[in-house]
Amino acid sequence: MLQLVVDGLFVGSFYALVALGYSMVYGIIKLLNFAHGDVYMVGAFTGFVVLSSVTGVAAVGGLASILIVLLIAMLLTGILGVTVERVAYRPLRASPRLAVLITAVGVSFILEYGVRQIMGPNPRVYPVRLSGETFNLLGARITLPQIILFAVAAGLMVALNYLVMRSRDGRAMRAIALDPQAAKLMGVNVDAVISRTFFIGSALAGAAGVMAGAYYGTVDFLMGFVIGLKAFTAAVIGGIGNLYGAMLGGILLGLLESFGTNFLGGEWRDVFSFACLILFLSFRPTGILGARVVERM
């Protein structure tokens, strides 16, 4: 039983990192950014390219090299997120939401098949594969890389929470989420804050991509599609637009998959996620921590 909890928490931490980007963007501009999962894929490939091409990075050592590459991938995917927002979403900010949603799907395809054109259609083996000592925790087996990656994911979530709740930028983000026009009248640079939100959310997705590549050992150009849908599911479960909800939804989804696949088999893993999504959208679309919002006309 404890082994299932450990496995679920570990996978759920990846989902939570990606789901945070979904929730941040939705919370501030009410956009379902379906290209967000592909930013995760670009992060994984950034790690692959850096580890493969920069002499000496892979030789630094498994975990140390991954942490260096993780920072590089966070920077590059953050810039990618800002670029996508500036080029694809900002010109449509006053357009109907359906137009922006279709644009997000188009950006997703551009990222997927752009990477396919550059890196090829076949899965690539990650240059560095994390391995390490295995510990016994009350009967559950947990490896050193799992502990470290979980700690990195938790550290990033704590840092994000501090940024949003305690910093000047965080107050601006929350003000825009409540009322963008009022925030602008109070002197908040709305465009700059939205760009920083895309940077932070995309950087978190890039970090998750590098960690997943190093842990699972392979990357491919479609890996962002499924994780994107699962992160969206996690955001819906917790309450999309709510940061704590995204973290809670990611962890719950990881636990659900862990227990479900143990009892019914691995082929049911995706079925649990999407069945859960349908149930929440049908019976509690605001999620566990989300609040019902009345739009002003």
Image: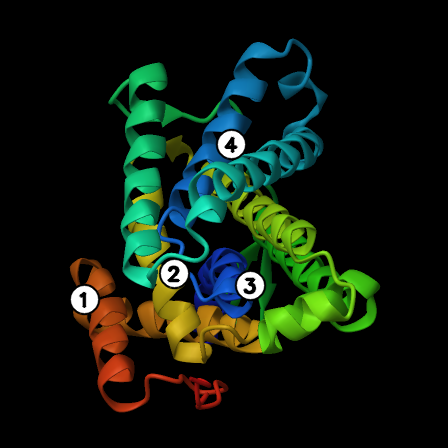
Residue at image point 66% right, 35% down: 75
Cβ–Cβ below 8 Å for labels 3 and 2? no
* Residue of label 4: 129
Residue 83, how many percent across, how many down? 54, 35
Depth check: give the residue in front, 269 or 30: 30
User: Could you tell me which secondary element the residue under label 3 belongs to?
Assistant: helix
Left of 97 or right of it: where is 159?
right
Residue at image point 60% right, 45% down: 203
Left of 273 or right of it: where is 67?
right
The label on residue 271 is 1
Spatial distance from mark 4 to mark 1, Cα to Cα? 29 Å
Residue 61 sits in which quadrant? top right
Tell me the kind of residue under disc 4: Arg
Spatial distance from mark 3 to mark 2, Cα to Cα? 10 Å
Against 156, is 185 above or below? below
* Residue of label 2: 32
Q: How is the image coloured?
A: rainbow
Tell me the kind of residue under disc 3: Met
* Residue of label 3: 24
Which image quarter holds the N terminus? Answer: bottom left
Spatial distance from mark 3 to mark 4, Cα to Cα? 31 Å
Note whether residue 220 is visible.
no
Q: Name the front one of labels 3 and 1.
A: 3
Which image quarter holds the C terminus? Answer: bottom left
